[in-house]
Image (cartoon, coloured by chain):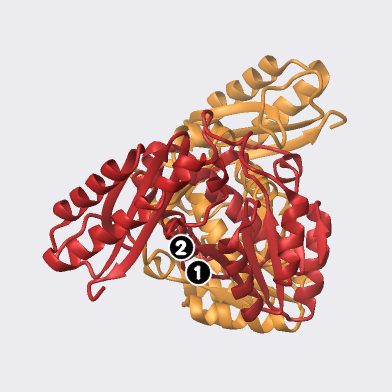
Chain colours: A red, B orange
Amino acid sequence: MNVVKTIAELKAFVNEVKAQGKTIGLVPTMGFLHDGHLTLANTARQENDFVIMSIFVNPTQFGPNEDFESYPRDLERDVKLAETVSVDVIFAPTVEEMYPTDGGIRICAGRQSEILCGASRPGHFDGVLQVVSKLFHLAEPTRAYFGQKDAQQVAIIQTMVRDYNFPLEICTVPIVREVDGLAKSSRNVYLTEEERIEAPAIYEALQIAKEEFLASQDVERAVRLAIKHIENKTSGKIDYLQLLSYPDLKVVTEETTQFLLATAVYIGKTRLIDNLIFNIKG
Amino acid sequence: MNVVKTIAELKAFVNEVKAQGKTIGLVPTMGFLHDGHLTLANTARQENDFVIMSIFVNPTQFGPNEDFESYPRDLERDVKLAETVSVDVIFAPTVEEMYPTDGGIRICAGRQSEILCGASRPGHFDGVLQVVSKLFHLAEPTRAYFGQKDAQQVAIIQTMVRDYNFPLEICTVPIVREVDGLAKSSRNVYLTEEERIEAPAIYEALQIAKEEFLASQDVERAVRLAIKHIENKTSGKIDYLQLLSYPDLKVVTEETTQFLLATAVYIGKTRLIDNLIFNIKG
């Protein structure tokens, strides 16, 4: 496995692979890898000739009061983990390597970014699209892999790829969970022991809401039950808990067949997200 | 030469060329070809294995009161002209083929788009970047060719390609002029006989300003002389006439070494643009 830090080295690898007519699977990450990332890489490994994993904590998707500085980083550890799933190249650039110039052009994520995480993180998805489009142009992947845990992110990236004709396929991988149901996340390391014990109530709440909705088709009641469960079982503060159509992220109507039940909860200072995607048959 | 109207047909051609490891030169146009476009195609022909010319009057770069509906179109004529310069594929999609869906994501051109043509055409360059990025993803060119007549457009596209790491090279070709100096433009057909006789004064004015600036280094005086010449020699209304640094399009300072002298003038109802790019040695 090769760890490259410059765009020039990455492009040399990509151009060589392209000249051979081989396929590339790209796994964009912010590092501090967990089983979710490794599942993405494993899937990419099975479906492509070569796998590139990017490890880059992208400053443009963090707000001024968010955890860009404190976001956990451990490249040495990540390199060892990536090796276990046979990643070919890790691309781990510096901020200066990724953003040496700024002519002021921005990708504005629009309607789909104004709700859920986007409502409390203004500009977040603009930054995501900025770095993702750069990575797509740099790695020229045949397929790019994203975790379903960031369901809104996946939906917005899929919209960009579709509406802007990026020559690649977006592949998603289901959420990987701890034994007690907590969604795996690099941010779980922020949790205190007590907070970690409370945190699985988030997933429990989503399951309660899903069952209620499938039984009653009552969006408000389903959401209310889930909120009550989180309020009863945790000391957390709910940022949002919503049931929307998926992947267009609109209000549920009688025509909706696929659903996103998504939540973000502050457990102490840690913002955790989780979701379920399901269709009307459950 | 092949004329294709669907993305599927274009992609089939592109994928075949890519599989052979050959290069593609892309010439994006809005059709109604003139010698400027043919010079672009000729240059692309010399520098690439295959040449794709797109012919698409892009609605998203026209304002509500602009000439989208009346913009001259003649595909049959364009096909014959493109054949004379050995274009391999003409991509002439419908609006529906290019924009079948709209998830609301936009490319915001930013600072460089707020001046010159951008000031009187709000959203114009956002629309240009939208269609150009789509065409880049569809045609996957090694090189893309743009006329220097749209100097601000070229500067903004170059910024996008640089800051978003598009894997291609932007090539520019000098302005092609009529015998009397008028810059070739598809919009010249709008001019009445009288207006056509006045129009070369635009280029004369730019030359006067350039000479004055090289002699005196006095931006204001140079611009004033040019404006006076257009006001004296035409019935036109000046939209802007400015001397800026190039390619960053900022106010000229003592450090500036390359200059853009650009103007837009309404001759009757027709908006004509022209420019000179020069360095301090002329």
Callout 2: chain: A
Tell me the residue that label 1 is attached to.
Answer: A173
**Residue B188 visible, this angle:** no
Mark 2 lies on a secondary structure that is loop
- Quadrant assignment for the C terminus of chain A: bottom left
Q: Could you give the CA–CA distance between mark 1 and mark 2, rounded to whole angstroms?
A: 6 Å
Identity of the amino acid at label 2? Gln
**Eyeballing the image, is B264 above or below A23?**
above
Is residue B261 found left or right of B30 in the rendered image?
right
Q: Are marks 1 and 2 on the same chain?
A: yes
Identity of the amino acid at label 1? Val
Mark 1 lies on a secondary structure that is strand
- Quadrant assignment for the N terminus of chain A: bottom right
Q: In the picture, residue A72 is in which quadrant?
A: top right
Q: Residue furthest right?
A: B281
Front residue of B147/A102: it is A102
Q: Are marks 1 and 2 in contact (CB under 8 Å)?
A: yes
Tell me the residue that label 2 is attached to.
Answer: A148
Tell me which residue sits at (78%, 52%) in the image: A76
Front residue of B26/A172: it is A172
Sequence-first disc among 1 and 2: 2
Front residue of B21/A80: it is A80
Is residue B22 found left or right of A61 in the rendered image?
right
Which dot marks residue B167? none
Tell me which residue sits at (53%, 52%) in the image: A185
Q: In the picture, residue B255 is in which quadrant?
A: top right
**Residue B73 visible, this angle:** yes
